[in-house]
């Protein structure tokens, strides 16, 4: 059956558009990294992993695997780009870590 009635076509299209709009608003929204709360260094997991927002403040005696230049921004668990200052980290679900930070869960991007 071929739709040639313009009024019927219009009603079909507007109905489909309204339905799509309702679907989009009903979908769960993924938080953007800049909306995520920052991981506090006092967080129990962060503390256990030696997370510091500023990697230059890592206690190298306590964390000998830390080396200068190892940063969240070049860790495979960092969800941002090289231009992102804060981003999600797979080790801290629902929170953001600093691109200049580091923790002992660090694993270099491949
Ligand atoms: S796992 Fe990687 S990105 Fe996450 S806090 Fe540790 S060093 Fe940063």
Image (spheres, rainbow, N blue to C red):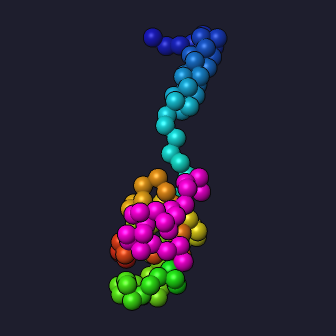
Please tell me which residue lies in front, 107 or 55: 55
The residue located at (35%, 87%) in the rendering is 64
The residue located at (58%, 28%) in the rendering is 21
The residue located at (50%, 80%) in the rendering is 55
Describe residue 70's horizontal placement relative to residue 107 as left or right.
right
Relative image position of residue 76 (x, y in whole percent)? 39, 69
Find residue 70 and report its image quarter: bottom left
How many dots with numbers? 0
Please, is residue 55 above or below residue 98 in the view? Answer: below
The residue located at (46%, 62%) in the rendering is 43
- Work out whether residue 57 can be spotted: yes
Relative image position of residue 75 (x, y in whole percent)? 41, 73
Quarter of the image containing the N terminus?
top left
Whether residue 94 is in magenta: the answer is: no
Please tell me which residue lies in front, 24 or 12: 24
Relative image position of residue 110 (x, y in whole percent)? 35, 75
What main secondary structure does the magenta stretch of the protein show?
loop
Please tell me which residue lies in front, 72 or 60: 60
Please, is residue 43 above or below residue 64 in the view? Answer: above
Please, is residue 32 above or below residue 62 in the view? Answer: above
Describe residue 37's horizontal placement relative to residue 103 as left or right.
right
- Work out whether residue 109 can be spotted: no
Whether residue 45 is in magenta: the answer is: yes
Q: Which residues are magenta?
A: 34-54
Relative image position of residue 92 (x, y in whole percent)? 42, 59
């Amino acid at each position: 059956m071929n739709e040639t009635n313009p009024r019927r076509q219009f009603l079909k299209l507007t109905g489909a558009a309204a339905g799509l709009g309702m679907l989009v608003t009903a979908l769960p929204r993924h938080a953007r990294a800049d909306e995520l709360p920052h991981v506090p260094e006092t967080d129990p997991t962060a503390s256990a992993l030696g997370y510091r927002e500023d990697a230059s403040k890592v206690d190298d005696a306590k964390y000998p695997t830390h080396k200068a230049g190892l940063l969240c921004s070049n860790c495979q668990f960092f969800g941002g780009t090289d231009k992102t200052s804060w981003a999600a980290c797979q080790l801290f679900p629902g929170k953001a870590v600093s691109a200049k930070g580091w923790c002992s869960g660090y694993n270099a991007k491949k």
